[in-house]
Image (cartoon, rainbow, N blue to C red):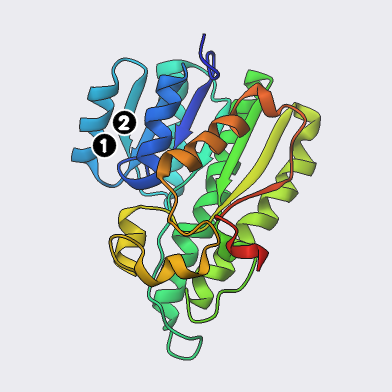
């Protein structure tokens, strides 16, 4: 029996990087997974590969109507949702606060922060129906500490906001047996990180005590734990997985 048997999960940004890893490991652990992303071709390809316990829906996480549709389809396909992984996010441009444009700021906030609010708002009623729920919001080490010169004010602001929203929901919905925790990865081997640094991490690894970037599966292992009943007494926490970056 898998660690997530009986769980119905929505995972956003599931067509690549950490989201793809989460989707694959969730299915392997027995969950039924609704995968969402804008990349329809890749999302459908992964869902087909994963079999009957995975279903892909194209979604713009910044759109309320898309969220309503995803939750409705999830319930119709697998039943009430009891796990939400708000994983979708972007880095945005690396600029200082003066150089960052209002449009660039707004786009990062819409995807990284507003979508987390929408995801929780429209999934919580389904979790209440299920009688249990676990929300895992993917923030960043940049939601714990400021990183000089990287990334932008918009990114850091959005990731700090995710941390706070997670705690608010943890307190408000504990009476419904719904937990909410945030995950704060450091440098992970994903396409987004490759764009920001170089394929192997290069100079970035010099500020990581463990001396390497994390594999996506290492983050997925933590997300599985938080989604599962193994973490049944954990809520409102921030889980740092950064190879020791924030310790220094």
Q: On residue 81, which mark appears?
A: none
In the picture, measured across the screen, residue 167 lies left or right of residue 59, that is right
Image: 28 above or below 18? above
Disc 2 is placed on an element classified as strand
Q: Identify which residue, 80 or 159, lies in the foreground.
A: 159
Image: 63 above or below 133? below
Q: Give the residue drawn at x 47%, y 62%.
A: 110
Image: 165 above or below 82? below
In the picture, measured across the screen, residue 137 lies left or right of residue 64, that is right
**Rendering coords of residue 46 (x, y %):** 25, 31
Q: Give the residue drawn at x 70%, y 34%.
A: 179
**Rendering coords of residue 27 (x, y %):** 41, 22
Q: Quadrant of residue 227?
A: top right
* Residue 113 in view: yes
* Residue 66 in view: no
Distance from disc 1 to disc 2, alpha carbons, whole Å, reads 6 Å
The answer to the question of whether label 1 and label 2 lie on touching residues, with beta carbons closer than 8 A, is yes
**Rendering coords of residue 96 (x, y %):** 47, 86
Report the label total: 2
Image quarter of the C terminus: bottom right
Q: Identify which residue, 60 or 36, lies in the foreground.
A: 36
Residue corresponding to mark 2: 56
Q: Give the residue drawn at x 72%, y 46%.
A: 237
Q: Residues within 10 Å of mark 2 (few under 14, many from 20)?
A: many
**Rendering coords of residue 196 (x, y %):** 34, 68
Furthest-bottom residue in view? 98
Residue corresponding to mark 1: 43
First in residue order: circle 1 vs circle 2: 1
């Amino acid at each position: 029996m898998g660690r997530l048997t009986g769980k119905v999960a929505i995972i956003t940004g599931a067509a690549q990087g950490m989201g793809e890893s989460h989707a694959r490991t969730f299915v392997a652990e027995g969950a039924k997974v609704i995968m969402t992303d804008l990349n329809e071709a890749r999302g459908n390809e992964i869902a087909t590969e994963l079999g009957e316990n995975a279903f892909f829906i194209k979604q713009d996480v910044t759109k309320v109507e898309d969220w309503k549709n995803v939750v409705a389809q999830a319930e119709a396909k697998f039943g009430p949702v009891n796990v939400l992984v708000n994983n979708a996010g972007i880095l945005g441009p690396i600029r200082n606060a003066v150089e960052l444009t209002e449009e660039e700021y707004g786009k990062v906030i819409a995807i990284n922060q507003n979508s987390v609010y929408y995801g929780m708002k429209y999934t919580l009623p389904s979790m209440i129906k299920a009688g249990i729920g676990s929300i895992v919001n993917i923030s960043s080490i940049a939601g714990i500490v400021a990183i000089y010169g990287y990334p932008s004010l918009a990114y850091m602001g959005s990731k700090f906001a995710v941390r706070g929203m997670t705690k608010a929901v943890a307190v408000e919905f504990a009476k419904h047996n719904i937990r909410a925790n945030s995950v704060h990865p450091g440098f992970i081997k994903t396409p987004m990180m490759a764009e920001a640094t170089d394929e192997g991490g290069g100079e970035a690894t010099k500020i990581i005590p463990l001396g390497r970037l994390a594999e996506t599966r290492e983050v997925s292992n933590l997300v599985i734990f938080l989604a599962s009943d193994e973490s049944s007494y954990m809520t409102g926490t921030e889980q740092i997985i950064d190879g020791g970056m924030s310790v220094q």
